[in-house]
Image (cartoon, rainbow, N blue to C red):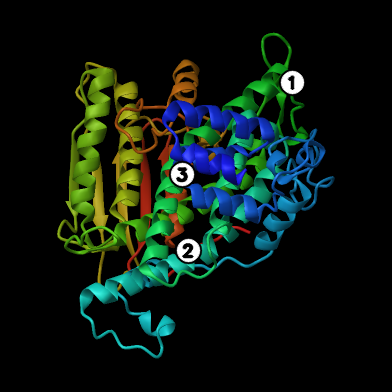
Amino acid sequence: FFLLFHFAFRRPPTMRAALLSQAHRLGASKAARRLIQQQRIRSAARALSVLGTPIPPPPQHLRNNLHYHRQLRPFASSVDDPEGDDGMSDEVAKLVRQHAHQPQTSANLETLMKTGRGEFLHKTYKDETLKDGPHAATEKILIQVAGFLRHELPIRLAHRIVDLNRVPLMKDMPSVRAVRDLYLTSFLELVSVDKEIKNEAQEEEFSKLLENIYERHAGVLVQMARGAFELRAAIKSGAVECPTSAKSANVDAAGATLVEFDKMETTHDFLDRFYISRIGIRVLIGQYLSLRQPPVENYVGIICGRTSPYEIVRRAIDDASFMCTRKYGDAPEVIITGRLDLSFPYVPTHLHYMMLELLKNSMRATVDWHGVDADYPPIKVVIADGKENEDVVIKVSDEGGGIPRSNMERIWSYLFTTADPAIQEGMVAFNDNVDHSVDSPLAGLGYGLPISRSYARYFGGDLSIMSMEGYGTDAFVYLTRLGNTREPLPI
């Protein structure tokens, strides 16, 4: 294998392709082949050594080797597979379990900012003083953060791999299996890196690995939405038996029992855990990669020390108005009142995501309720804060007809959406990363509200909805002012 990697790395693309094909024939894993394609020869070799691959292995041994960890066993429930080892060889499963049994280390906004400013360097470099200027301090910060991520990320990924293997029904959906394989690939790449990152060269190499992982996982939200779409279709077609808890007492016109997908609590709990964990992983990696970029005023990595809710809301209004006008030809006016001068430490992209989702929903409801050519009542945004307040609170109020009380619980469901099924099917089929994009439809995956609530809760806030059917809806976003609430890490 090593000779194949060596020549694949040295030869022209056509020769490399042939050698990659030979590596595939001999049983090299997809992860290892990807490393070859990226010309990361040493990482590929390390990955093989971690996996315990003999050189060269006999064919029968290869069939039982770790390179075949992607072959899936038949369906097994979490009772049959209590350790969540579905589809993994014994050696890989043991490695995943070792990490999944370790506790995750929770972070918070305040800690991320202090670490980025170097206020915790003394904990790593107890016997050293930073006398070589800001450049040396910055390098030590990056090495310190990289060392933490080398320890923490495999643990977090292992927890999710086990969860992805255990969750009933969802784990058998092709898109969910693909996500599991994606997490497993990233996990194996990370554990192949030296446990201690001690110098700039190691830190730089590690940063390239995390850049690839960050980009590779960008489409996971839509991929999991695709998995939920596949599960709904499988239940409706009868390919998968509907859980008893989701069976409705009502029947459709053909006499078939209706399915209440919002009652599938096990699936929803799993998706809540998965998405809150995904937010945490992307915050940690995004913060580290941002620290490696040239400094931006008022920013420490992805965190802005002077985040202005007013400015974020204005940008979200522009984006939501664009999307609404594109669909309906017009958009309701939005009026902002309250503490327009307020600023506090937060991640602007998270706040923008939440506000865009709420404003999209309000604009769509207002236009649908009043009619396309009507004189729309304005949507009102209130930003509230006071010196004694523990939260910054943002309220979005509309007169879009409200939500029926029977649907209030469903709005937090990952398996319930009022969007056109054809639009949703198109989104999960062709889009890889639409969750932060103005290119997505005004109503799409049905994930907007539950994901927005996860963003709010990640740093200790919350999102709640109150509605008056026949009139309108009020949405409240609560954001902690101090930033000292730890991540709600799922187990």
Nearer the observer, 484 or 97: 97
Q: Is residue 11 above or below residue 251?
A: below
Q: Position of residue 17 (x, y in %)?
A: 50, 28
**Could you tell me which quadrant the N terminus lies in?**
top right
Q: Which mark is residue 368?
A: none
Determine which residue is flagged by label 2. 149
Query: Mark 1 or 3 closer to N-term?
Result: 1
* Residue at image location 42% in from the left, 61% down from the top: 459
The residues bearing labels 2 and 1 have C-alpha atoms spaced at a distance of 41 Å
Amino acid carrying label 3: it is: Ile
The secondary structure type at the circle numbered 1 is loop
Q: Please identify the quarter of the rendering in which residue 128 is found.
A: bottom left
The CA distance from mark 1 to mark 3 is: 28 Å
The residue located at (48%, 63%) in the rendering is 149
In the depicted structure, whether residue 281 falls above or below residue 114: above
The residue sitting at 48% across, 43% down in the picture is 450
Circle 2 or circle 1, nearest the eye: 2
Splitting the image into 4 quarters, where does residue 125 fall? bottom left
Task: Name the mark on residue 451.
Answer: 3
Question: In screen coordinates, is 226 left or right of 218?
Answer: right
Q: Earlier in the sequence, mark 3 or mark 2?
A: 2
User: Dot 3 lies on which element?
Assistant: helix
Mark 1 lies on residue: 239
User: In percent of the image, x 55 and y 34: which residue is there?
Assistant: 406
The image position of residue 469, as x and y in percent, is 43, 33
Task: Please state if 83 lies on the left or on the right of 352 as rendered.
Answer: right
Tell me the kind of residue under disc 1. Ala
Question: In what element is the residue under mark 2?
Answer: helix
